[in-house]
């Protein structure tokens, strides 16, 4: 049984400019695989090679055992794709657009209607008059409307409101439950946390980490700011993975690495008036995995919070 | 799938096609309506035409009497309006599938389905053939229709044959533009190259007609083969010209199809 996606030393150069370098990864059938990275990291280049739109400079990619460059139509019968910023034809309405794309994929007219209703999309409005979020809904409907075993999505939830983001995640979960494989490129860590089984992190064209979401999330650091009704005992936060960064008695700032449950249990014993937990975004993870420091955005956030302990948030 | 994409091409081209068709229809009709007046005043007009510089006459293909339908049609439409209309149509249509749609991100959508690149571009080329044919035959059709109303006595068969030559001329432009668009993947570059080539050939054709020493330059220009005056007036077809346009159009499109299959479609 071939993997849904196999990358073997996949490399792409644009002249002297780096696209991606030596990517090695397997995406198993039936899993939701997150592909995390900032803009310019190489996510879209990778996806364009998976789609057979551009040719690798070196190495290979296989989709369900097929070469996407030489066997593109066969690959495209097995995958549905959503780009990060699809260039829809503005004069077409979603009905015409989705019927056209559906027909090319062998679907009946209107196969997308139930999904459009679910996402509250008005299909009669010309695409050029749709908001960014509604245009994104057209893409989400398009990618989920077929029966292809592999879904490849590039920043699919960008522009969706929180309700629709939740609906999108439900669609991803349903796809996985139906045995479909999802390759989800994103720079939205919470979305990836909720949707994915495994995650690859790409930065500057190279894969720096592939891990299960549980391992990734369990491994990273959260910043917790507390306002207490009365000062806690000195050893109240002497817990596994918890570091006190600053404390004025009632205002306490701690960092938690790994399991947050011991801290939550301890907070249940305290008089907590307010709590703010910030999860590191993907940039923070990059600082960890690439530079060995979180003196970047997470550290800056701590400093901005008034603790003055810039850079000490390193795990 | 070809028909699906072809129908979409036609749908996307309708505003361009209708707009250009209205222009050629109205202009051609007005010019045809004037023809009987020219015919009735041939001698005076010929005297008047002698005042114009030879270069200007050459530029507009005025190599005979305006009383001749072929010279009349070539002067006002074949060498003047049609190259402009055909260039606009060919450039817009032929830069769209490989360059404009790639730039705007549309082509990723159909090309992310089982639709092959060959079918995608082939359907677009089919669309170019049809739209340019419609424009060419509306051009001669308008002249013929109004000519019949005012009793101009135009030969419909010869005019329709001239329409076919106009169509081939436009197809040659579209074939070259399509190839440049596939090579550059840039609508701006492809349009500029095609327009630049056309303008250069237009000027070369004038030089070739004005300066006997450079007459050979005329053979290098499309305008040397685009004249339909002899075809309308004497029923003499320029088979070399027809062959050149057919070969250029066909070669441009075939090369486009072959190249597009192997082309990196960059984001």
Image (tube, rainbow, N blue to C red):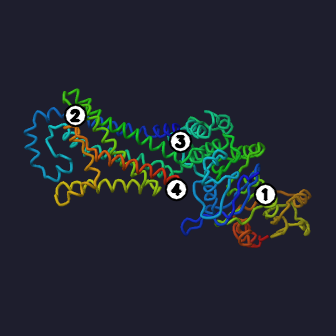
- Compared to residue A34, the image places residue A90 above or below, namely above
Q: Disc 3 versus disc 1: distance between alpha carbons?
A: 38 Å
Element type where label 2 sits in the image: helix
When asked about the image quadrant of residue B145, the answer is top left
Give residue B177's position: percent from left, percent from top.
Answer: 40, 51
Instruction: Say which chain tag 2 marks.
Output: B
- Residue at 30 percent across and 35 percent down: it is B25
| Disc 3 + disc 2, Cβ < 8 Å | no
The residue beneath circle 1 is A213
Q: Nearer the viewer, mark 2 or mark 4?
A: 4
In the rendered structure, which disc, 3 or 1, sits on the residue that comes first in sequence?
3
When asked about the image quadrant of residue A6, the answer is bottom right
- Residue at 22 percent across and 26 percent down: it is B149
Q: Are marks 2 and 4 on the same chain?
A: yes
When asked about the image quadrant of residue A250, the answer is bottom right
Element type where label 3 sits in the image: helix
Q: Nearer the viewer, mark 2 or mark 1?
A: 2
The residue beneath circle 4 is B263
Asked whether, in this view, residue A29 is left or right of residue B103, the answer is right
The residue beneath circle 3 is A129
């Amino acid at each position: 049984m071939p993997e849904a996606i196999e990358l073997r030393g996949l490399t792409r150069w644009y002249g002297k400019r780096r696209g991606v370098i030596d990517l090695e990864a397997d995406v198993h059938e039936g899993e939701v695989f997150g592909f995390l990275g900032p803009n310019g990291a190489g996510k879209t280049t990778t996806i364009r090679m998976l789609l057979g739109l551009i040719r690798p400079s070196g190495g290979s990619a296989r989709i369900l055992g097929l070469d996407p460059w030489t066997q593109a139509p066969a690959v495209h019968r097995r995958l549905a794709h959503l780009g990060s910023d699809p260039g829809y034809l503005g004069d077409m309405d979603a009905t015409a657009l989705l019927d056209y794309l559906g027909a090319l994929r062998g679907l009946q007219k209107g196969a997308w209607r139930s999904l459009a209703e679910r996402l509250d999309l008005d299909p009669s409005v010309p695409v050029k008059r749709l908001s960014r979020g509604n245009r994104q809904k057209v893409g989400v409907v398009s990618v989920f409307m077929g029966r292809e075993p592999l879904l490849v999505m590039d920043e699919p939830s960008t522009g969706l409101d929180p309700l629709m983001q939740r609906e999108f995640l439900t669609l991803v979960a349903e796809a996985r439950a139906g045995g479909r494989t999802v390759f989800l490129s994103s720079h939205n860590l919470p979305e990836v946390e909720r949707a994915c089984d495994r995650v690859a992190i790409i930065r500057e064209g190279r894969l720096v980490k592939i891990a299960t979401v549980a391992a990734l999330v369990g491994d990273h650091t959260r910043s917790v700011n507390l306002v207490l009704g009365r000062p806690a005992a000195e050893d109240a936060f002497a817990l596994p993975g918890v570091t006190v960064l600053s404390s004025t008695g009632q205002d306490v700032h701690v960092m938690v690495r790994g399991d947050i449950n011991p801290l939550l249990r301890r907070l249940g014993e305290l008089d907590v008036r307010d709590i703010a937990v910030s999860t590191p975004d993907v940039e923070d993870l990059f600082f960890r995995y690439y530079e060995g420091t979180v003196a970047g955005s997470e550290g800056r956030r701590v400093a901005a919070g008034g603790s003055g302990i810039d850079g000490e948030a390193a795990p | 799938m070809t028909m699906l994409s072809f129908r979409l091409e036609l749908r996307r081209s309708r505003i361009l096609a209708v707009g250009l068709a209205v222009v050629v229809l109205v202009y051609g009709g007005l010019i045809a309506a004037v023809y009987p007046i020219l015919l009735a005043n041939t001698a005076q007009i010929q005297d008047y035409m002698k005042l114009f510089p030879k270069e200007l006459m050459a530029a507009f293909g005025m190599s005979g009497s305006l009383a001749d339908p072929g010279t009349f049609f070539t002067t006002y439409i074949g060498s003047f309006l049609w190259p402009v209309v055909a260039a606009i149509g060919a450039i817009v249509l032929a830069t769209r599938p490989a360059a404009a749609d790639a730039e705007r991100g549309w082509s990723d959508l159909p090309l992310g389905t089982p639709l092959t690149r060959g079918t995608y571009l082939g359907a677009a080329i089919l669309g170019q053939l049809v739209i340019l044919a419609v424009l060419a035959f509306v051009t001669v059709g308008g002249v013929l229709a109004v000519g019949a109303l005012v009793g101009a006595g135009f030969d419909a068969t010869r005019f329709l044959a001239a329409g076919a030559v106009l169509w081939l001329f436009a197809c040659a432009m579209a074939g070259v533009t399509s190839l440049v668009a596939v090579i550059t993947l840039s609508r701006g570059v492809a349009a500029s190259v095609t327009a630049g080539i056309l303008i250069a050939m237009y000027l070369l054709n004038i030089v070739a007609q004005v300066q006997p020493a450079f007459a050979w330059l005329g053979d290098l220009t499309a305008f040397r083969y685009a004249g339909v005056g002899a075809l309308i007036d004497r029923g003499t077809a320029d088979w070399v010209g027809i062959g050149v346009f057919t070969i250029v159009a066909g070669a441009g499109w075939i090369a486009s199809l072959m190249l597009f299959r192997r082309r990196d479609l960059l984001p």
